[in-house]
Amino acid sequence: MTQKALAQNKEIKRSLVLIVIAIVLGVLLGFAGSHHGWTLGGSSALPGFALAVIAAFVVQWLAYIPAAIAQTDRYFDATGALTYISVTILLLVLSPGLDPRSIILGALVIVWAARLGSFLFMRNRRSGRDDRFDEIKTSKIRFLGVWTVQGLWVSLTAAAAWISITSSERAPLDWTTWVGLAIWVVGFGIEVTADLQKNRFKADPGNKGKFIQSGLWSVSRHPNYFGEILLWVGVLVIALPALQGWQWIALLSPVFVIVLLTRVSGIPLLEEKAQRKWGDDPEYQAYRASTSVLVPLPKSRRGSPSPSNTN
């Protein structure tokens, strides 16, 4: 067997393990988050949060079928966004005692998913593909792995909102609602602004081959990720009064987002890609040395501020 074949077999085995782990974690999340929650058809029926987790995985697997046949990743991000929206609406419709807190949480998740999903879809449409999937989508098992992991990603990220919506505890609106909403608005505003600034920068032919270091990107190398983390912290704060017992697993929601973006597939991959592209550029070296990686902060004196590219 050739080295290439051995490497492919190894990747397939890793993907199978990843699929099993994602499903097991999804089951555990659904079980824990369903405690003290409402169920469909009585106490012995399916808990609302468990239904949400199951639906999140099933949607990915259904979307995977045509995507695998066509070997395309074009609708991967859009499917994730539509999962947030459809499952959240499903829970709001099925909820036996819908309260203002649940409505607010549902609205925040839907607004965020609709905005980010449309943004990612249009970006993917312009580029024609996502180079992360170039090799993966040629293997049905490896491709199934990323779709399955997306089911877990959706479930974990939305856990705080979904557990609160399906909780049997109905707490009146209080300071946590307004503090959480304020945090969400700030985070959402930062994420949207950062994305728009980068879009305008890339749309300017004069910036071809350059990196953005203006606007929010002058005080953070990844301001969009900072906004993303902040808004999910806001969702958790709003959800807190409705949590009971094992439902506190909802705390994993922002923790998961933080770990994912700062340690796994977000910042590490983009930093590595940027280093390969501009690592020998003195201007990029100065930008990297003087600019915070995530939290927007004033320029550091470790590097000399370099001229900002205009959007």
Image (cartoon, grey):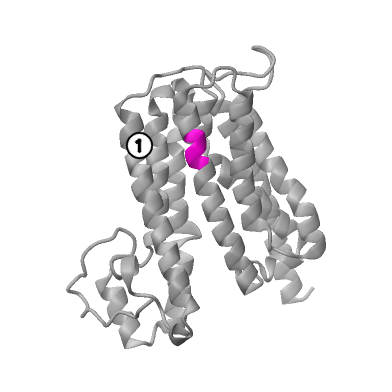
Residue 212 found in image quarter: bottom left
Note whether 172 is above or below 103 in the view shown: above
Foreground residue, 212 or 1?
212
Which percent across, then down, holds residue 203? 49, 77
Note whether 303 is above or below 228 in the view shown: below
Extreme residue toward the left, this view: 301
Quadrant of the drawing holding the N terminus? bottom right
Extreme residue toward the top, this view: 43
Foreground residue, 143 or 106?
106
Which percent across, then down, holds residue 78? 63, 55
Q: Which residue does the image show at 41% across and 19% down from the upper left?
A: 171
Which percent across, then down, holds residue 224? 41, 59
In the image: residue 306, left or right of residue 115? left
Please provide the residue range marked out in magenta. Answer: 105-109
In the image: residue 112, left or right of residue 127? left
Q: What residue did someone put label 1 on?
A: 180
Quadrant of the drawing holding the C terminus? bottom left
Label 1 Cα neighbours within 10 Å, binned few <14 / some 14-19 / many ≥20:
many
Which percent across, then down, holds residue 169? 46, 17
Residue 95 sits inside the magenta stretch: no
* Secondary structure type for disc 1: helix
Note whether 309 is above or below 96 in the view shown: below
The residue type indicated by label 1 comes to: Gly
Q: Which residue does the image show at 54% across and 42% down from the upper left?
A: 110
Q: Which residue does the image show at 68% across and 58% down from the upper left?
A: 75
Q: Which residue does the image show at 66% across and 30% down from the upper left?
A: 51
